[in-house]
């Protein structure tokens, strides 16, 4: 037997224009058939509601379908809502209440929060506080195997909902809306979240509710902001959709990810919650290391005890393969521009980048011929790590943080590009956001991977990939399946959002004369000397 498909209408600020709203609902039903319910967010009543409302309140007129509304958003309309726990206001019109969960006989679960975020210590009757949000979250998160709610209704937009998404137009989502609503949405993972109050229509691209490679796939969320009823700009105020209650859906169908899915706009909140959950699990369970396997189903984990691999044999250290032709980066090769070399270790060396994005843009390179980080032997990896630590300390002494990236695509010798960014210019979160946003614009799926994991855990030798690493240890990874923009890493860092040097995105436009390169290398070598472990060996 097929699960029941519910047909739902949602609308923005009614502001007392009941005849306009219900007239539109009747027209929609005449054309498309009957709907099961109407959900109203924002201001249901307005300053001139009394005349129209009186006809509905006294039963002279009746709403055409069951209508559920949120409470007051200002002092003037508090009088229309006599019971904070919810009540019937008129036939077919129900006030849901201050906060809670509405579950119909169909199994559809609707979480709701009335009012606007309180800016006062004593919460007014038309506002909600952090306590209200915490209690609503706790009531749901305490349910065993809680996956999320079908629908979330709030009047204010969630703060930052535009992050990683399509443009919300004139509404600045970093300034408008409620941070408490963001927190609520991040926790309750609604399949649909409706809001209003901004007199704008905005249907955000669907976003993920799981951290890729760290959590099992979950359903996506859709945020829809609706305009005010009958607005003269003809902005959309009524939204129709069909939904099967989450509890009745096939789990595989529920977690399907649409093509246009984005990162969660509340990624920072989700990460903090995930870290807290991980710490709790670490206290309760014995430690177990996991490798994240991108060759199989995304998000699946395989234990590191070797049982699935048959008779495990430890890897023998092997010599790096020899290049098939001239290599510009093997240190013994005559093609290497040795005047750019600034430090030489046992297995790796540092060189200034030719046509660097900045004067102190450097490369970490293996002395032998290795194609990627994945191919490196353990002793080379160890020295790469030493150079990363030395460069972090060096750049931090100059008020900078480094961004490192590798493109293992259309290259034959590993080049770890290390570019410093001033600490006062942007945060590590800003850098990550810029990479993710610009990746999405080019249909590149850039995934955040666990902080302490190794690239070898997510990519096999020979796999084309691009990855970014911050000096905090945070990493972003993309498996290249077809083509990839060769200058992507430089373009993101050079963009107006970060260094503001778009004219330097292409290294060929930044090359200098040999005497200038020699002078730059000498200056870097001198400054780096106190941090260079290779000189202290």
Image (spheres, rainbow, N blue to C red):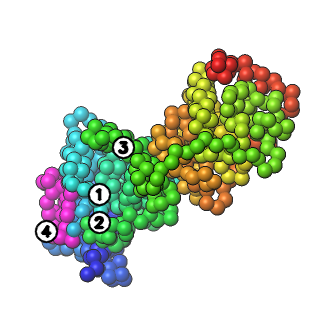
Q: CA distance from mark 1 to mark 2?
A: 9 Å
- The numbered dot on residue 288 is 3
Which mark sits nearer the N-terminus, 1 or 2?
Answer: 1
Viewer-nearest residue: 71 or 446 = 446
Return the residue at label 4. 58
Query: Which of 165/238 is in front?
Result: 165
Q: Nearer the viewer, mark 3 or mark 4?
A: 3
Residue 423 % position (x, y):
56, 28
Q: CA distance from mark 1 to mark 3?
A: 25 Å
The reply, left or right, for residue 507 in relation to residue 379 is right
> Foreground mark, 3 or 2?
3
Q: Which residue is mark 1?
A: 147
In the picture of the structure, the residue carrying the numbered disc 2 is 246
Question: In this rendering, which labeled residue sits more in front, label 1 or label 4?
Answer: 1
- The image quadrant that residue 25 belongs to is bottom left
| Residue 334: % across, % down | 85, 37
Distance between the alpha carbons at the discs numbered 3 and 2: 32 Å
Residue 397 percent across, percent down from the top left: 59, 20
Part of the protein shown in magenta = 77-106
- Label located before the other in sequence (3 or 4): 4
Q: Is residue 40 left or right of residue 387?
A: left
Q: Please determine whether, in this image, residue 402 is positioned above or below residue 485.
A: above
Residue 127's place in the image compared with 10, above or below, is above
- Pointer 1 and pointer 4: residues touching (CB < 8 Å)? no
């Amino acid at each position: 037997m097929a699960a029941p498909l519910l047909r739902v209408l949602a609308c923005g600020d009614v502001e007392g224009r009941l005849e306009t709203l219900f007239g539109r609902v009747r027209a929609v039903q005449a054309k498309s058939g009957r709907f099961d319910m109407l959900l109203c967010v924002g201001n249901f009543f307005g300053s001139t509601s009394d005349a129209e409302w009186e006809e509905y309140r006294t039963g002279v007129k009746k709403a055409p379908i069951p209508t559920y509304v949120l409470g007051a958003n200002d002092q003037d309309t508090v009088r229309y809502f006599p019971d904070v726990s919810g009540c019937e206001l008129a036939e077919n019109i129900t006030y849901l209440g201050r906060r809670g969960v509405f579950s119909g006989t169909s199994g559809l679960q609707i979480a709701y929060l009335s009012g606007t975020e309180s800016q006062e210590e004593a919460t007014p009757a038309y506002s909600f506080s952090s306590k209200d949000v915490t209690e609503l979250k706790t009531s749901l998160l305490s349910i065993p195997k809680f996956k999320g709610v079908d629908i979330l209704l709030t009047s204010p937009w969630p703060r930052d909902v535009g992050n990683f998404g399509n443009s919300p137009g004139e509404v600045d989502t970093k300034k408008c809306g409620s941070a408490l609503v963001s927190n609520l949405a991040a926790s309750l993972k609604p399949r649909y979240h409706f809001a209003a109050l901004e007199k704008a229509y905005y249907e955000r691209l669907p976003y993920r509710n799981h951290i890729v490679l760290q959590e099992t796939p979950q359903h996506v969320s859709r945020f829809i902001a609706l305009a005010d009823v009958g607005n003269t700009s003809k902005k959309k105020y009524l939204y129709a959709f069909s939904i099967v209650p989450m509890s009745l859906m096939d789990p595989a169908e529920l977690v399907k990810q649409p093509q246009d899915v984005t990162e969660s706009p509340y990624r920072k909140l989700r990460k903090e919650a995930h870290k807290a959950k991980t710490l709790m699990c670490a206290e309760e369970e014995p430690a177990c290391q996991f490798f994240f396997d991108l060759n199989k189903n995304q998000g699946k984990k395989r234990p590191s005890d070797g049982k699935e691999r048959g008779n495990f044999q430890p890897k023998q250290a092997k010599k790096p393969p020899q290049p098939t032709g001239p290599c510009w980066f093997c240190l013994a090769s005559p093609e290497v521009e040795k005047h750019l070399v600034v430090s030489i270790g046992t297995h790796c060396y540092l060189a200034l980048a030719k046509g660097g994005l900045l004067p102190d843009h450097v490369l970490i390179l293996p002395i032998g011929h290795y194609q990627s980080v994945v191919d490196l032997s353990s002793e080379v990896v160890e020295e790469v790590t030493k150079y990363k630590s030395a460069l972090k300390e060096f750049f931090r002494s100059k008020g900078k943080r480094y961004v490192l990236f590798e493109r293992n695509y259309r290259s034959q010798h590993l080049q770890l590009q290390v570019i410093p960014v001033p600490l006062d210019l942007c945060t590590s979160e800003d850098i990550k956001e810029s990479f993710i946003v610009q990746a999405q614009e080019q249909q590149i799926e850039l995934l955040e991977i666990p902080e302490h994991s190794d690239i070898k855990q997510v990519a096999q030798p020979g796999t084309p990939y691009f990855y970014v690493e911050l000096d905090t240890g945070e990493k972003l990874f993309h498996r290249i399946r077809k083509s990839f923009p060769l200058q992507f890493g430089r373009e993101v860092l050079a963009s107006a959002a970060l260094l503001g040097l778009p004219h330097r995105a292409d290294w060929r436009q930044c090359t200098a004369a040999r005497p200038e390169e020699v002078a730059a290398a000498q200056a870097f070598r001198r400054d780096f000397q106190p941090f260079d472990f290779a000189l202290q060996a």
